[in-house]
Image: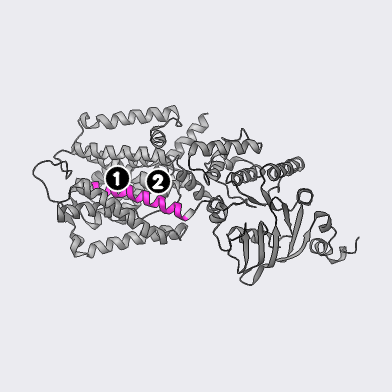
Amino acid sequence: MEKIKDALNFRDFSRAEQVGLIVFSIFLLIFPFLGAGSFVKAVMIQFLLFSLFGMGWNTIGGYGGQVELGKAQYVGIGAYTVALLMVWWKLPFWISMPIGVLIAIGYSFMIGYPLFRLKGHYFAIATICTSLVLQDIFVNWKMVGAAKGIELPIHEHPDFLYMQFKSDTYYYYFIMILFYVALFYMNWFRKSRLGYQLRMIKDDEEGAESLGIDARWCKIKAYTIASAFVAVGGGFMAVYNLYIDPYSVMDLDLSIKIALMAMLGGAASLWGPIIGAGFLVPLDRFLGSWLGGQKGLIGVDFMIYAMMIMLVSAYQPRGIWGIIEQFRKRGK
Amino acid sequence: MAFLEVVNIVKDFGGLVANHNISFAIDEGEIVGLIGPNGAGKTTLFNCIVGFHKPDSGKIIFQSKDITGFKPFQTNRIGIGRTFQIMKVTTGMTVLENVMVGAFCRIEDRTKAQKQASAILGYMGLSGMEGAYLNELPIAMQKKVGLARSLATEPNLLMLDEVASGLNHTETEEMVGLLRRINGEKKITLFLIEHIMEMVMSVSQRVIVLDGGEKIAEGLPGEIVKNTDVIKAYLGEKYVKGL
């Protein structure tokens, strides 16, 4: 009970933030009726999906302060489990998705245990490597479709069990629900014992250990939570795109995007990943489709994207949310 | 059986022997000071006891349990608290939150941990500081918070590494009073490294002296100040005979 109360309690935020959350929620709720085109709808779904990824990353990367650049492997595990179980045994999404999450949890324990012997840059590099290795295995593994990937069987009629719908609106509401579950969970997490302990570990690991905190175990727990989040998103990607291959769900590019969105928005804050995704997903999409269409300008969008990341990280390492907080402090 | 027993501890950092065959015992309820010139191996000895270093040989026995090779969080959980000489400061965490992390060592529930943390801050005379950010406080104050944080883990033995450095005269006297209260009221055994002689000699019931990685003396504060080896270590050979 106490936990649920904590999850739903946003009272320690300022009035402006509470109002912002309410307005934002109303907008999300009525968005499909605003008559937006399918492109905009797809961007909104991407935004919610990446917010979910970012919030998951925020447990280990933000609160725990461990630069984790291998989240794509868990997106892949989630997506492949859903796709393969559907193709092989016709298992519905609602069974295969939890299985995917469980596999991700088990796998992240296995990986996390040796990985957290490493610290700082070494840890970051190791996370990239494990993700790349898994991707390479899937590229060459014939049984799971190798580099060609897997197509999900398309049902003639919309089917809730297999999460197949004609209209994007259903997918939109489904990912929105997942988004809110994640948001409430994170709201509880930041106030939890583990949340406090991780924040201490981030700044002063020795100090944390001297206060009875098993730093390595705490990090493994946070890493596992993050992986579970991301695997849920991966499962969604499979049923939404109806096609997955190792390049779309396990790429390094995806890992980096997940981490960067959270960092750009503001790591270790509840709103950070949402702001980051709200900023970068549309930018990425609109710039990509606008500049990508013009001859000779392919890749310019990436330059703009990179430039912004450099600027933010040079001037305010705590991201966009850090800039907002700075202005609020000055105003007081 | 002694409360804390250190038996023949040796710690060698690749040729530099920081601790050489150090043995001593501390009884429950005592206040013991650990002094010695810079580089004598005091902090290394602390780190060996709490488990940040693994001693090359020797044994550490706490409450009749062999804790040699325990990890720092394990020694803390069985009741050894410690503070740091140089404290790394958390950013974005308030004083209250820092102490709460200590309280979370024994308490699962957040509201209870918060109550415990506030109580300890009140006990240490830090009420009203709860909302301040640790990195915005002066160093002397940060050390007090470090002490509060450690106290919140409910230790039986508290090891303090230069908790009074940087304090002025009045603050030092307050600290002595506080340490006596912690020892008397909370029944916590204290083991402290300190450079300020006035403080060490007034608060300690017994003093251990290290020099060059070896224990050169141990005894009552009154005996230590007259000990020729100690004078030699601190001032040099020629002062042994007096000025």
- Relative to B95, say whether A101 is above or below: below
Q: Does A285 sit left or right of B37 as displayed? A: left
Residue at the far left in the pictured view: A156
Within 10 Å of disc 2 (Cα), the crowding (few <14, some 14-19, many 20+) is many
Q: Mark on residue A284?
A: 1
Residue A93 or residue A45, whichever sits in front = A93
Question: In this rendering, do the residues under marks 1 and 2 share a single chain?
Answer: yes
Whether residue A233 is in magenta: the answer is yes
The residue beneath circle 2 is A58
Q: Is residue B198 visible?
A: yes
| Viewer-nearest of discs 1 and 2 | 2
Identify which residue is drawn at 38% across, 27% down.
A19
Question: Of the residues shown, which amino acid type is indicated by label 1?
Answer: Asp
Whether residue A291 is in magenta: the answer is no
> How far across and how far down the image is residue B73, in percent?
54, 54
Identify which residue is drawn at 25% across, 29% down.
A30
Tags 1 and 2 touching, CB below 8 Å? no
Q: Which residues are magenta?
A: A216-236
Q: Does A113 sit left or right of B189 as displayed? A: left
> How far across and how far down the image is residue B136, in percent?
59, 40
Q: Chain of mark 2?
A: A
> How far across and how far down the image is residue A105, in percent?
33, 53
Residue B64 or residue A188, whichever sits in front = B64
